[in-house]
Image: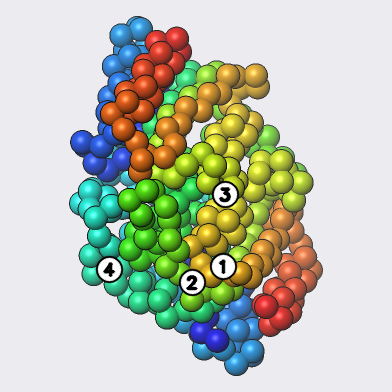
């Protein structure tokens, strides 16, 4: 299986980077092909410019900076996102990647009656590995916006029976080294089984 | 009142640009002091840098990267957000405003790993937005932006502050009439703000 890992954290030696390495190792251990996008390392620009917005409803985006991302998405059969949850959602960088790359005529087609046809139906597995400062119950009270953006919003553009996985380490601000190590182990096990 | 208007849309001729103009015009007409923050026009960078992330919890220095925005936010007595919903969320440029400006020591304190909201200078919040898809589809998706405003932002500002969320759904099928009706709704809300 071909797996695309999208990683988003500004600090190269963060805990998220360790999560990314664990995810990539686990995917390789399954014998899958893997590609990695590191949004901060490549300096991805998450801000959709005016021209791109003006032509959004007419055609797929033509910015050459997006071409490789679109090609990776079309290649992938599975997508794993590794990012910190900030303000209950995706970092702006990753949100902008959705805004710009998961565009009309790339990720979905729009009918004259407003109907949406998914175009990412070759993606049959969609997973999230994330860290949250908040507790599990408080994230639940807020409504888990980040989780819903991915597992419902993006999933709706993937294969009809796309499998999902959501692994979160809550209460990051008080986590101990043992907590973090246990989560890395859980991530390895769960990704290998996914 | 000092009203901080946060606006996020790149296209000057868009429906959202018209709503933004209407919001600012009506608030000023009612005698409010409006600080109109157009994130695209101000070329706001929503990406948190490595240095910012490393210094995030240092409340003596973390605002240095965004001092001007922090001061504007702290001066506000009310907050109005004007933005389109893209892919069931804020446009990246607006999401990044929360990531970078809603810092420890600015909008909350961290006490034993728990968040204690502190943005109590803001006593009123309104969001004005538009969705490409239908209300039904937004509900199926869990409507993340509505939850962020009604729950997260509500929990961050002064306890008990009124929060309103005005949305035009199904923009892809909108007509002159639906758009005019929504503009009227926004105008009424801003006149009564």
Q: Are marks 1 and 2 in contact (CB under 8 Å)?
A: yes
Chain of the residue on which disc 2 is drawn = A
Q: What whole-number distance in Å separates the C-alpha atoms at marks 4 and 3? A: 29 Å
Question: Around disc 4, counting alpha carbons within 10 Å, would you say few (fewer than 14), some (14 to 19), or many (20 or more)?
Answer: few
In this rendering, the answer to whether A31 lies above or below A152 is below
N-terminal of the pair, mark 2 or mark 4, is 4
The residue at the far bottom in this view is: A31
Whole-percent x and y of residue B45?
Answer: 35, 49
Q: Quadrant of residue B114?
A: top right
Disc number for residue A160: 1
Q: Report whether A109 appears left or right of A141.
A: left
The mark nearer the N terminus, 1 or 2, is 2
- Residue placed most toward the observer, B191 or A58: A58
Q: Which residue is mark 4?
A: A65
On screen, B65 above or below A23?
A: above
* Circle 4 SS class: helix
Q: Which residue is mark 2?
A: A121
Q: Is residue B94 above or below residue B76?
A: below
Q: Which residue is mark 3?
A: B141
Question: Residue visible at 35% across and 71% down?
Answer: A70
- Number of residues whose C-alpha sits closer than 10 Å to that of mark 1, classed few (under 14), some (14–19) or many (20 or more): some
Residue contact between numbered discs 3 and 2, judged by CB atoms under 8 Å: no
As helix, strand or loop, the secondary structure at mark 2 comes to loop
* Image quadrant in which the N terminus of chain B is located: top left
Q: Chain of mark 4?
A: A
Location of the C terminus of chain B by quadrant is top left
């Amino acid at each position: 299986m071909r797996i695309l890992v999208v990683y988003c954290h500004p600090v190269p030696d963060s805990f998220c980077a360790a999560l990314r390495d664990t995810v990539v190792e686990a995917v390789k251990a399954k014998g899958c092909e893997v590609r990695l996008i590191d949004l901060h390392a490549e300096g991805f620009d998450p801000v959709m410019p005016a021209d791109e917005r003006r032509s959004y409803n007419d055609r797929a985006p033509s910015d050459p900076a997006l071409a490789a991302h679109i090609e990776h998405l079309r290649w992938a059969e599975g997508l794993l996102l590794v990012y910190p949850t900030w303000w209950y959602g995706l970092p702006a960088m990753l949100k902008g990647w959705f805004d710009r790359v998961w565009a009309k005529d790339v990720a979905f087609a729009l009918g004259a009656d407003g109907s949406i046809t998914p175009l990412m139906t070759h993606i049959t597995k969609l997973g999230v590995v994330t860290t949250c400062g908040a507790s599990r119950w408080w994230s639940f009270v807020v409504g888990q916006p980040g989780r819903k953006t991915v597992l419902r919003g993006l999933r709706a553009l993937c294969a009809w029976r796309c499998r999902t996985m959501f692994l979160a380490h809550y209460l990051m601000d008080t986590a101990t080294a043992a907590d973090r190590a246990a989560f890395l182990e859980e991530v390895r096990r769960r990704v290998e089984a996914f | 009142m000092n009203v901080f208007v946060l606006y996020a849309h790149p296209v000057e001729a868009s429906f959202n640009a018209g709503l933004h103009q209407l919001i600012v015009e009506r608030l000023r007409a009612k005698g409010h002091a409006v600080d109109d923050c157009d994130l695209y026009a101000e070329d706001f960078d929503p990406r948190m840098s490595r240095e910012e992330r490393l210094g995030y919890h240092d409340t003596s220095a973390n605002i240095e990267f965004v001092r001007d925005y922090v001061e504007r936010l702290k001066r506000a007595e009310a907050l109005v957000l004007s933005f389109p919903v893209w892919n069931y969320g804020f446009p990246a440029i607006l999401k990044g405003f929360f990531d970078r400006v809603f810092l420890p020591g600015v909008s909350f304190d961290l006490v034993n790993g728990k968040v204690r909201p502190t943005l109590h200078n803001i006593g009123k919040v309104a969001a004005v937005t538009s969705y490409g898809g239908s209300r039904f589809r937004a509900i199926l998706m869990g409507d993340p932006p509505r939850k962020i405003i009604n729950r997260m932002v509500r929990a961050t500002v002064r306890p008990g502050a009124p929060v309103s969320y005005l949305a035009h759904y199904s923009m892809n099928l909108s007509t002159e009439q639906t758009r005019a009706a929504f503009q009227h709704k926004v105008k009424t809300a801003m006149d009564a703000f």
